[in-house]
Amino acid sequence: MKQNIEINRLFLVLTLVTIMILISALAANAQGGPLTNAAVTRNNLSMTSNTDYNSTAKISGVSGIAENGNNAITWTTVMEDNTKQFEVEYSYDNKDYQRAGIVNADNKSEYIFNHVTAVKPSTFYRLKVLGTNGATFYTKPIEVKNGLAKSEDRVAPTVIRDNVLNMTITNNYRNLQVFNSVGDEVYRENLAERTGNRVSFTLPTLPSGPYYVRLVGTTKSVTKQFMISH
């Protein structure tokens, strides 16, 4: 009988201890206690962190515009608790990102970063937000389109049936050369930096097969492939 009483007392003590632990855990979570290995998506921001979402900046919007040869990236924050800095990253293909610069957090709610980069039809940007406790998260990428970007030099069509080579030439070149598949030059013309959406060249009668056109400039050269088919 005495042994049963001791067992019941032990069970009661263990139950009380368990209840106290659960109450403490619930209270810590309600007060913004740490979350471990949390992967959270809120307000269109993807975050993977070992800390509470509220321990770093909350960004309400990121935008960008191309102006005067620069890409101006702007973002606003509604909270910057324990935020160390913002790293602006850019990419031309929305895959491989590299850092454009760092902006220190100073609780001013609106930030502008001017990025001077190569003129491309589109440049993608995202923010890497670093907390003072080591937490990081990335904003979703935005696309900045540049109306000043030149289209690519190209051959169109790439299959020629009438001995007329049509090209879009957007950059300045001195000469145009055409080579056959073994590297022999079969045509040459002085471009004198001529450009246009449809620049035509009448080629000599050439056998069917693959050919290469080379545009030669002072600082750059490009080579494009085309086919002659009779």
Image (cartoon, rainbow, N blue to C red):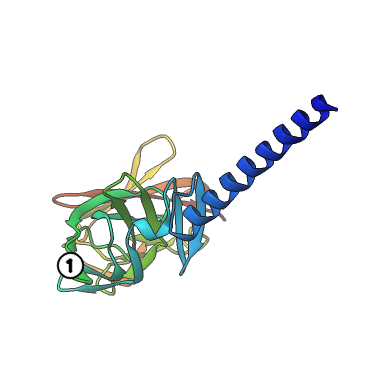
Query: Can residue 200 be seen from the camera position used here?
Result: no
Q: In the displayed image of the protein, which residue is found farthest to the right? A: 1
**Position of 149 compared to 141: left or right?**
left
Q: Counting other residues with Cα less than 10 Å from the Cα at mark 1, is it few (<14), some (14-19), or many (20 or more)? A: some
Q: Nearer the viewer, residue 111 or 217?
A: 111
Location of residue 63 with respect to 18 vertically, above or below: below
Task: Pinpoint residue 24: horizontal percent, then vertical percent.
Answer: 52, 50
Task: Place residue 176 in its image quadrant.
Answer: bottom left
18 up-or-down from 139: above or below: above
Between 167 and 71, the residue placed more toward the observer is 71
Q: Position of residue 31 (x, y in %)?
A: 44, 59
Question: Where does residue 149 sit, x and y in percent of width and height?
Answer: 27, 68
As displayed, is residue 17 above or below residue 162? above
Q: How many marks?
A: 1
Please identify the quadrant where the C terminus is shown: bottom right
Up-down relation of residue 126 to residue 71 (above or below): above
The amino acid on which the numbered mark 1 sits, given as a three-letter code, is Asn
- Is any atom of residue 37 visible in this view? yes
- The residue at which mark 1 appears reads as 70
User: 91 or 102, which is in the foreground?
Assistant: 102
Q: Nearer the viewer, residue 110 or 72?
A: 110
Measuring 38% from the left and 55% from the top, which residue is drawn there?
Answer: 138
Q: Secondary structure at mark 1?
A: strand
Quick one: quadrant of the N terminus?
top right
Please provide percent x and percent y for residue 217: 18, 52
Question: Residue at horizontal 67%, vertical 37%?
Answer: 14
Q: Residue furthest top?
A: 3
